[in-house]
């Protein structure tokens, strides 16, 4: 949990989860793009992102990645910097 690779993978997961939650909330109501309450959709996406980060932290014990069964490793030849 204390590696840059962990936090990069967690950030990617949080953004992806937020986008999925916003898309789900918009399409579930079958609204047009002009009919969407974007504040509410953003709030749903933000909550989903926070939950994704908390889930990654809670399941980070014992592995290098943000999930129970995941291991995040850099590709050979790449340099990871803060």
Image (cartoon, rainbow, N blue to C red):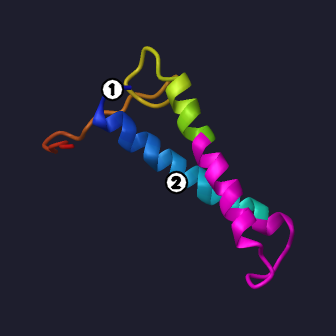
Q: Answer yes or no: do the residues labelled 2 and 1 have beta carbons within 8 Å?
A: no
User: In the drawing, what numbered circle is on residue 26?
Assistant: none
Residue drawn at (71%, 55%), measured in percent from left and top? Answer: 44
Q: Which residue is mark 2?
A: 15
Taking the image as shown, residue 67 lies to the left or right of residue 24, namely: left
Q: Quadrant of residue 43?
A: bottom right
Residue drawn at (55%, 23%), measured in percent from left and top? Answer: 58
For residue 55, above or below residue 63? below
Q: Quadrant of the C terminus?
A: top left
For residue 6, above or below residue 14? above
Say few, some or many: other residues with alpha carbon within 10 Å of mark 2 (under 14 / 14 to 19 / 20 or more): some
Between 50 and 5, the residue placed more toward the observer is 50
44 is within the stretch colored magenta: yes
Q: Which region shows up in magenta?
A: 26-50
Residue 1 x, y percent position in the rendering: 38, 26
Residue drawn at (77%, 61%), measured in percent from left and top? Answer: 25
The residue tagged with tag 2: helix, strand or loop? helix
Q: Quadrant of residue 65?
A: top left
Gap between marks 2 and 1 measured at Cα: 20 Å
Q: Which residue is mark 1?
A: 2
For residue 43, above or below residue 31? above
Residue drawn at (41%, 20%), measured in percent from left and top? Answer: 63
For residue 67, above or below residue 11? above
């Amino acid at each position: 949990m204390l590696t840059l690779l962990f936090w990069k993978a967690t950030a990617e997961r949080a953004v992806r989860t937020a986008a999925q939650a916003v898309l789900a909330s918009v399409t579930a109501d079958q609204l047009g793009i002009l009919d969407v309450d974007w504040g509410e959709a953003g709030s749903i996406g933000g909550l989903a992102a926070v939950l994704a980060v908390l889930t990654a932290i809670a399941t980070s014990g014992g592995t290098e990645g943000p999930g129970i069964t995941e291991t995040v490793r850099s590709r050979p030849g790449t340099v990871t910097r803060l």
